[in-house]
Every structure is written in structure tokens, then in C-alpha cells.
């Protein structure tokens, strides 16, 4: 670390705790990467929790003339969130909000994810105007600072147009809150010269007729190139100019501490159609025809874009047979009711009458198909990146043409690509706005590639910005990527005006220097990100960051994207060390490699829950957990013999686990819950994490004798249920009852009820009673106490034993179910997912939520319990697409259901809650506050329920317990 940054670190240590002042090599690399194809590694990463801490950081940096860059989600694409100086990262905190005026406005801090804002507004039938494709991952700070727009918002509903109020922090640490009259009055006095300077520039701009005309023309289109000069012609008051200048300023003029949006209606009824046309010219004419219709969005996709998604599930078969040169429009219409939708669809049909299409236009009203169309459209950029050659990056640019010249602009742009040898380009975009994205793979390692890229960008800038008077950056922000071309697009007078604005607000050029404005004409060709081959499982990752919002370790260590970033750097350094007997690597690089591997053991491997949720958000389905399990396999080869012994004596292993729980129960009786907690923490720390950490919510041992008694026909309340060996003998007596094979997971065979839970029955007892109540005959597999799906071994990289346990289970379930004749119910959702992925396709494997919703509800008479209950949808249920059924099941059984926001995977991850308890604690931060009004919570994984109980402050049980409470047998 350079001397000035060491001095800064020491100064900040008086205010911020060490864990939020990050300077180790691994995390500097990981946290310093964003979704662009640029790489700068910061000297220091600081994570302030609130505005006062941020002001302190800015003032300390200002005193030392050290540049600062702000980072929200890091999903931006133009290099505006990377730095080799100080990076301020919005981590925990910054997520407060307030819904105002019955949903007509919302105040948001910059760390709120865009989709979360819309979730908060949904009960009011409203949403925020901006709707970028990354809305499920990007944060409000980035949306506003980049003036991100998206598919439906156009130019009328972006952040600039829907801004009501703003709270911002300037480079000198001064705070302005336009919603606070007292603060505004004080700011007008303390910063009178700034306000006067902005107002003078406004007058100068408005009186320059040609410049004002050019500005108005540029913002008729989508435009995020340079600063928001339209603020100088749209407003006269300096504060209005200032707040609107902040929109799209990419952290170069100040920090947006909160923003209040005027919201827009979210029409509830939606329909979409894919319209196919023989060529791009016809497609553009159709776009122009649709401009006057009441459509919400029109998305253009060329033949190459369609080809990249044509094999994805659910896509129309016609995609595969489209001729070369064909293109499509995704047409979206929305309304308040079916009649409005029908009328708007009719307007679309009328507008397209006489325009040649390849297929009859047909709108879908099916919610799943509608969502699929949009998911595929939003995933086009990463999907293209996934099929690139390993070692290359993927470039995305977004330009805007005047829509009336869209067809000729597209043809000219395509000819420019071909002239420079770029044949693998796809085009898609927001057609109504003339906004096109072009995506292509680009290598920078081979001779001549950087020069070829520069020649292409020079010609594109001349074509779009000068010849067509369009925008070089329509919605992705200028960043570093387009900074060298701002003057070319805008002209010398407008460019000089931007520098004057920068000098007024950031005279020392300390806020994100070189972003938007730069004197460096080759900036866009420098600090290019290396993407070396690391592992086939993750080589197709383009580091978009879509995965990060659902990762349980995001606030603790690394996210999936960051794990891949570090793994790539490890691969690069490994290759250097291995090349020419290590002669390619310097001593410093060797030391860096050793340190990175050492830190990656915890940061990257140990704290990964390997839950697979990242794959649900990744447009190309990358499961970073697979990478981590492979790394665990490499590290744990010496434990294979132990895994073999445990697997071959699994019933004994579970007996030992129940014995340990019995000892813990004794400890509860002697020491009390707090005493057990203290002793458990001490033993865990003293053993270096080798001993599991017991907590007050660690349950009693499960009464496994229940299964034995049941198999012998002695289970209380059963209707003569039998084990599989008695099925043939007594089958005729049970002919009137449907049969189901019940497999209690190893977790439910080990963990019983909580010590302070009023529910006294274990999951096994509850499940058996509920199945009996619903009229099922239950079959228990032979040697059930020895069976395991193998997930406990797979998660630790012990693949051989995991496969052995899966084969063993497969054999027993086929026997018990008579080769799939009867469904198999497992009471634990993650185990069911593992079984569905590995066992014989003849088996009908039932997840507890799905089985309860589809099979048990119709057989029972319900009386919902009169209370508010919490529900945790496990990661496995999410991956199986069962979240809606989970909530519907709970709502059928209780008066009110609370689903805590932004709690995805609980992070318990089998045994991580015992061995790495900080992962569970971090993943469930804020849970207790959200479930404070609930008496009990429900889930569908016994180990998850242990951690949920601890950090939620209420007992969590199986969702089957709630159904049992709310139901009785039908007469």
C-alpha cells in the first residue's frame, strides 16, 4: 500500500472498525471488479454504514487529495465503478426506504435493489420508472447515478424525469437535502457561489440558441453521454439544476445519499407477442408503425440474437427455422383489465397491417410464457458472452439513432462491423427509442486486436454521434469506455461546458477521475480485464453480477462473481509459475499466489453455502457451488477413507449424532440455554473451528424409535401402515388407500424438536400423522436408518461416497415404490432436489411443499389458524420453482403470512451453521426484525430451521406442522 493510503487507513481506523477497512490482496481484487471489461485494483476498500461515516471518509480523502470512487452493485458496464485509488462500497446499511403519498412516491437509499423498490410499491399498483434489465441485481444508487432506463421507461420515466427530491453529499462533505427546507436554506447560504455558478451557466446555455437546440435534440433520444446538460435548459434554480445534474453523473460530482422518486402506474394485466419479420428494414418499419400505439415496450432482436436463445426451453420452434436476415420484435402491452388489453392488442394489429411478417402475430397472456419471453430478452447480453471463446471478453455498447432513421442506421452499423472483421455481432435493443445494443466477443491478447477494436470504436463514434446525430451511450453511462469520445459527440462548446460543471462541483478532480471526462484519448484501451481459462464450470462467466443479490455470503466474504474473479487470477498466476519452470513469474507474483490461495480457503471455499441459488439468477445457469465443491474435492482427498467408513456405517453415524444431541440436552438442563451457548462458542473457538458450535436452538435428538414402531404397525393414530416387506402380505387390506413411500431424511432422523418449542412431535411423527389424516397408506423403506441421498458427502467434495449413497438409496426406493408405482415423499426439500438430480427417472420424487399443496390439501378440511406466521422458502424450493406454492400453502393454513424480504438462502448449508456459524448469522441478518410479529415460522429443511430459530427469535418448524395444525380429516 502506498504511503498516503497507509496514512488514510490509520486515520479512518479511529472511526470505522477494521472489518470495514479492507486492504488484503484477495478482497481488493474481488471487490474491485465490476461488470465492465476493465480491471483496476484499489489501494483500499471502505464500507461506510451511514452518511456520517461516508462524510468522514470523503473529508479524510479530500485532505490528502486522494481520489474516490463509489460502488453500489457493480453491474455497470462501462468501467465507471473501478479504481486504483479508494473504493467506497455500499455493503450493509444504505437500504432504508419510505413509501410516500399512498405509493405515489418513494424515498430510497442507494443500497436498495431496484426490484425491492418495486416489491414495496406493488401493493399500491405502482413502480419506479426506470426498469433496467439488471433490476433484480442493480441498486438504486447505480440506477440514478447512471440514469439507467430499460425496456419500458423510455425517456419519460427515467430517473431524471421522475426525480422528486434528493439528498446528496458533495466532494467537500457538505450535505444537501431538498426535502428539508431548513437544510435547503442553510445550503443556499453556505454554497451560494456554487448555486450562482450553476445559474450563470444555465443562462449562458439558454441564450446560446444553437447549443440549446442541440441539447434539446440530444435528449429527445435516450442519452447518457457526458453530463445532463438538459438540466441547464430545463431549470433555472441552481438547486434544481444541481440535483438533475447528479442524475447520470456516475459519482463524479457527488454522492446520492437518498433519492425520492415520483412513481408510475404498474398496470396489472400484461401480454406479449413475438413478431417475426423477413429482414431488418421491415422490422424497423414495423417499429416506426408501433410508435403511435399504446404499447409498453417494443424490443428488437436480430437473427444472431434469436439464434443465441433458440434452444432454450419454452422458446417457439419457429426460431430454429427463421431465414438469415430475419429479425423479431417483442411487443409488450399492459392495461388495467382484459378489455383494455384486448383493445390495445387490436391497435397493434391495425398498425402492423400491410407490413410483411413471417408468422401470424399472436399475444400470450400466460404468465409463465410472458415471463419467459422477458427473461430471455434480459439475458441476451450474458447469453452471448457465454458462448464466446475462452480467454476473450464480451463487449456491449448501446447507441441511439433518431427512430425515424433507425433502419438506415442499423444497416450502416452492421456494415461498419463487417468492414472491421466483426462477424459475430448481435443486435438487440429498445426499438421505440431507437436504442440499440450491440454485443460481440473481443480478445485483447493477440497482436493487432487492440488496434482493431480502436478502429471499430472510432468509426462507430463518427457514424452514430456525428453522421446520425445519435447517442454513443443511450443508457449504460459514459464510464471510461466512451469518455474519449464525449467531445466528438457533443462538440467543443458543450464539452467545455461539462468541464466547467466538473470544476464547480469537484474542483480538485477527486471524484471518480477519468470517468465521463478525460484528457486521455486512449483511456478506453487501457487496464483491460484479463479473463484467463480457470475452470470449464465457470469460464463462460462474464462477471455481470446478477448472481450477487441472492448469495448468502455477500455481506460476509465473497459472492459467486467474486469467487470466479479470484479463481481466474489464481489460474493466471498458476500458469505463470508453471511456465518455463516458473521463470515467467516474479518473486512478488509467487508470493501473491501463495497469499491468494491461503485466503481463498476461507473467503472463497469455506464460506460458500453451495446452495445453487446463483444459478437461478445467472442468465447462463452457472452454479458456482459446483466450482467450490470441486475445489473441496481437491482439498479433501485425504479424507476419502473416512467418508467411506462413515457412509458404509451410516446408521451408526446418525446414532452417534443423536448421542451428541442427548449430551447437549443434558447440558441444557444443567447450564441452561445461555450456558450451553457460551460453552459451545468457547469450544468452537478453542478447537479452531473443528468442533461444531452448539447454540440454544440446537434441538433434541429425534425419536427414531418412531419409525421402528411404525414399521411394526404400532404407530399411534395410524391406519395399519406397514413397512415395504409387509406390503404384499397385507396389500389387500389397504387397497382402498393410496400408497406413498415416506423417506425421512437423515436430518430429520437426527434432529428432533427444539428445547423451547411448544410443538412436541418430531418431523417424522408429524409427517406420519398428517399422511394418515389424509388417508394415505405409508410405506417405510427397508434399512431407512442407513439411507442418505449423498448430499452430505457431495457438499464436502466426497463425490465417490456421495454417488455410492445415491445408488444405495435408489435401489431401496425402487423396491419400496415397486419401481415407481407409488410416489416417494421426502420430508426435507434439499434432499429431494438432490434425489431428483441423481436417482432413477422412474421414481416419482415428491418435495414436501409440492406434495402438501397438490396432494394433501384436497384431501383435508382446513380451518386456518388465527395468527401471523413466518415462512422461509428454502433455496432448494426456489430452485425447483416452488416459491409460489410454498406461500399459497401457508396462506391456506394461516390468517397472515410473512415472507421476509431479501432473505434468500439461510446459509446453514447442511452443517455450516455449526462449523461456520458466521455464514448463517450474516445470511439471516435482519430476520428477527421482520418476523417480530409472528409466533412461529415454517420451512421445509430441519437444519435450516435450526438457524432460522436462532436468528429469527421464534421457533421454526416444518411447513407440514402448519398444515397439520390447520386441518382435520374430511368426514
Image: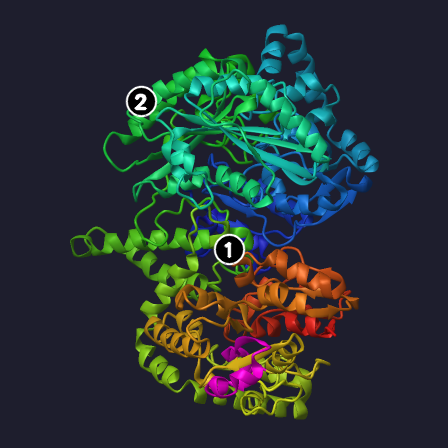
Name the residue located 30 percent from the left edge and 54 percent from the top edge: 571
761 and 476: which one is in front?
Answer: 761
- The percent coordinates of residue 506 (x first, y second) are 59, 31
- Residue lying furthest top: 209
Query: Which label sits on residue 832?
Result: none
Is label 1 in a helix, a strand or a loop? Answer: strand
Instruction: Between label 1 and label 2, give the one nearer the viewer.
Output: 2
Query: Is 577 placed above or below 35 here?
Result: below
Residue 728 drawn in magenta = yes
Name the residue located 31 percent from the left edge and 73 percent from the top edge: 637
Please indicate whether residue 723 sits to the left or right of residue 567 in the image: right
Q: Which residue is mark 1?
A: 22
Is label 2 in a helix, a strand or a loop? Answer: helix
Please indicate whether residue 12 sits to the left or right of residue 461 in the image: right
Please indicate whether residue 641 sits to the left or right of residue 823 in the image: left
Name the residue located 32 percent from the left edge and 73 percent from the top edge: 800
- The percent coordinates of residue 616 (x first, y second) are 50, 53
Name the residue located 35 percent from the left edge and 51 percent from the top edge: 568
Magenta region: 722-751
- The percent coordinates of residue 374 (x first, y second) are 54, 39
Asked whether residue 586 is in view, the answer is: no
65 and 207: which one is in front?
Answer: 207
Residue 829 drawn in magenta = no
Q: Which residue is mark 2?
A: 418
- Measure the alpha-carbon separation of dots 1 and 2: 45 Å
875 and 198: which one is in front?
Answer: 875
Amino acid at each position: 500500500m502506498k504511503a498516503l493510503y497507509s496514512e488514510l487507513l490509520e486515520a479512518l481506523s479511529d472511526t470505522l472498525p477494521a472489518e470495514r477497512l479492507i486492504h488484503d490482496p484477495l478482497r481488493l481484487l474481488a471487490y474491485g471488479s465490476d461488470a465492465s471489461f476493465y480491471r483496476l485494483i484499489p489501494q483500499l476498500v471502505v464500507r461506510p454504514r451511514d452518511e456520517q461515516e461516508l462524510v468522514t471518509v470523503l473529508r479524510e480523502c479530500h485532505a490528502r487529495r486522494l481520489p474516490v470512487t463509489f460502488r453500489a452493485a457493480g453491474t455497470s458496464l462501462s468501467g465507471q465503478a473501478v479504481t486504483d485509488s479508494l473504493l467506497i462500497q455500499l455493503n450493509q446499511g444504505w437500504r432504508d426506504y419510505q413509501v410516500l403519498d399512498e405509493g405515489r412516491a418513494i424515498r430510497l437509499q442507494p443500497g436498495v435493489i431496484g426490484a425491492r423498490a418495486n416489491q414495496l410499491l406493488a401493493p399500491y399498483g405502482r413502480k419506479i420508472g426506470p426498469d433496467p434489465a439488471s433490476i433484480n441485481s442493480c441498486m438504486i444508487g447505480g440506477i440514478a447515478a447512471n440514469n439507467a432506463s430499460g425496456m419500458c421507461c423510455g425517456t419519460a420515466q427515467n430517473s431524471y424525469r421522475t426525480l422528486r427530491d434528493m439528498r446528496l453529499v458533495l466532494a467537500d462533505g457538505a450535505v444537501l437535502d431538498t426535502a428539508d427546507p431548513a437544510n435547503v436554506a442553510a445550503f443556499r447560504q453556505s454554497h451560494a457561489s456554487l448555486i450562482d455558478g450553476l445559474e450563470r451557466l444555465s443562462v449562458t446555455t439558454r441564450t446560446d440558441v444553437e447549443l440549446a437546440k442541440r441539447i434539446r435534440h440530444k435528449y429527445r433520444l435516450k442519452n447518457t453521454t457526458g453530463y445532463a446538460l438538459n438540466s441547464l435548459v430545463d431549470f433555472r434554480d441552481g438547486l434544481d439544476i444541481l440535483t438533475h445534474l447528479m442524475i447520470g453523473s456516475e459519482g463524479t460530482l457527488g454522492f446520492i445519499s437518498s433519492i425520492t422518486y415520483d412513481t408510475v402506474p404498474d398496470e396489472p394485466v400484461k401480454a406479449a407477442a413475438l413478431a417475426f419479420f423477413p429482414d431488418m428494414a421491415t422490422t424497423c418499419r414495423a417499429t416506426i408503425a408501433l410508435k403511435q400505439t399504446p404499447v409498453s415496450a417494443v424490443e428488437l432482436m436480430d437473427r444472431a440474437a434469436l439464434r443465441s436463445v433458440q434452444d432454450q426451453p419454452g422458446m417457439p420452434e419457429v426460431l430454429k427455422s427463421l431465414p438469415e436476415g430475419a429479425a423479431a420484435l417483442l411487443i409488450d402491452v399492459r392495461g388495467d383489465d382484459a378489455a383494455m388489453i384486448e383493445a390495445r392488442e387490436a391497435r397493434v394489429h391495425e398498425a402492423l397491417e400491410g407490413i410483411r411478417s413471417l408468422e401470424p402475430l399472436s399475444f400470450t397472456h400466460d404468465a409463465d410464457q410472458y415471463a419467459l419471453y422477458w427473461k430471455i430478452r434480459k439475458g441476451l447480453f450474458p447469453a452471448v458472452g457465454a458462448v464466446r471463446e475462452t480467454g476473450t471478453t464480451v463487449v456491449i455498447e448501446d447507441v441511439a439513432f433518431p427512430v425515424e432513421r433507425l433502419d438506415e442506421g442499423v444497416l450502416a452499423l452492421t456494415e461498419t462491423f463487417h468492414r472491421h472483421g466483426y462477424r459475430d455481432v448481435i443486435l438487440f435493443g429498445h426499438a421505440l427509442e431507437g436504442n440499440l445494443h450491440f454485443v460481440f466477443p473481443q480478445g485483447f491478447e493477440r497482436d493487432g486486436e487492440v488496434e482493431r477494436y480502436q478502429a471499430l470504436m472510432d468509426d462507430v463514434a463518427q457514424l452514430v454521434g456525428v453522421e446520425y446525430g445519435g447517442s454513443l451511450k443511450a443508457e449504460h453511462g459514459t464510464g471510461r469506455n466512451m469518455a474519449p469520445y464525449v467531445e466528438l459527440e457533443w462538440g467543443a462548446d458543450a464539452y467545455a461546458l461539462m468541464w466547467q460543471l466538473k470544476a464547480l462541483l469537484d474542483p480538485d478532480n477527486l471524484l471518480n477521475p477519468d470517468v465521463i471526462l478525460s484528457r486521455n484519448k486512449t483511456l478506453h484501451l487501457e487496464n483491460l480485464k484479463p479473463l484467463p481459462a480457470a475452470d470449464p464450470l465457470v469460464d463462460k462467466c462474464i462477471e455481470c453480477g446478477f448472481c450477487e443479490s441472492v448469495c448468502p455470503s455477500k455481506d460476509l466474504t465473497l459472492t459467486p462473481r467474486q469467487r470466479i474473479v479470484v479463481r481466474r487470477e489464481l489460474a493466471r498466476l498458476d500458469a505463470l509459475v508453471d511456465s518455463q519452470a516458473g521463470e515467467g513469474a516474479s518473486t512478488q507474483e509467487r508470493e501473491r499466489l501463495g497469499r491468494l490461495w491461503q485466503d481463498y480457503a476461507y473467503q472463497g471455499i469455506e464460506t460458500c453455502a453451495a446452495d445453487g441459488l446463483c444459478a437461478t439468477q445467472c442468465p447462463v445457469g452457472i452454479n458456482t457451488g459446483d466450482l467450490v465443491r470441486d475445489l473441496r474435492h481437491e482439498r479433501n482427498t485425504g479424507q476419502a477413507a473416512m467418508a467411506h467408513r462413515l457412509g458404509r456405517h451410516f446408521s451408526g453415524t446418525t446414532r452417534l449424532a443423536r448421542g451428541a444431541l442427548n449430551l447437549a440436552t443434558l447440558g441444557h438442563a444443567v447450564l441452561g440455554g445461555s450456558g450451553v451457548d457460551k460453552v459451545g462458542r468457547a469450544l468452537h473457538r478453542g478447537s479452531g473451528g473443528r468442533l461444531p458450535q452448539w447454540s440454544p436452538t440446537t434441538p433434541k435428538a429425534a425419536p427414531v424409535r418412531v419409525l421402528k414402531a411404525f414399521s411394526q404397525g404400532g404407530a399411534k393414530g395410524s391406519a395399519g401402515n406397514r413397512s415395504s416387506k409387509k406390503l404384499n402380505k397385507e396389500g389387500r387390506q389397504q387397497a382402498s388407500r393410496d400408497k406413498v413411500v415416506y423417506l425421512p431424511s437423515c436430518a430429520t432422523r437426527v434432529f428432533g424438536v427444539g428445547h423451547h418449542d411448544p410443538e412436541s412431535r418430531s418431523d417424522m411423527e408429524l409427517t406420519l400423522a398428517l399422511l394418515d389424516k389424509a388417508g394415505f397408506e405409508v410405506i417405510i423403506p427397508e434399512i431407512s436408518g442407513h439411507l442418505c441421498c449423498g448430499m452430505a458427502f457431495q457438499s464436502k467434495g466426497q463425490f465417490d461416497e456421495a454417488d455410492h449413497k445415491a445408488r444405495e438409496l435408489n435401489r431401496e426406493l425402487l423396491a419400496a415404490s415397486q419401481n415407481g408405482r407409488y410416489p416417494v415423499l421426502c420430508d426435507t426439500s434439499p434432499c429431494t432436489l438432490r434425489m431428483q438430480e441423481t436417482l432413477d427417472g422412474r421414481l416419482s420424487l415428491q418435495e414436501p411443499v409440492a406434495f402438501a399443496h397438490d396432494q394433501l390439501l384436497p384431501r383435508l378440511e382446513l380451518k386456518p389458524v388465527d395468527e401471523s406466521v413466518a415462512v422461509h422458502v428454502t433455496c432448494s424450493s426456489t430452485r425447483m420453482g416452488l416459491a409460489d406454492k410454498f406461500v399459497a400453502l401457508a396462506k391456506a393454513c394461516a390468517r397472515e403470512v410473512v415472507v421476509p424480504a431479501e432473505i434468500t438462502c439461510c446459509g446453514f448449508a447442511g452443517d455450516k451453521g455449526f462449523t461456520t456459524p458466521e455464514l448463517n448469522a450474516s445470511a439471516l441478518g435482519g430476520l428477527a426484525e421482520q418476523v417480530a410479529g409472528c409466533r412461529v415460522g415454517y420451512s421445509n429443511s430441519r437444519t435450516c430451521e435450526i438457524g432460522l430459530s436462532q436468528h429469527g427469535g421464534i421457533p421454526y418448524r416444518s411447513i407440514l406442522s402448519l398444515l397439520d395444525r390447520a386441518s382435520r380429516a374430511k368426514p
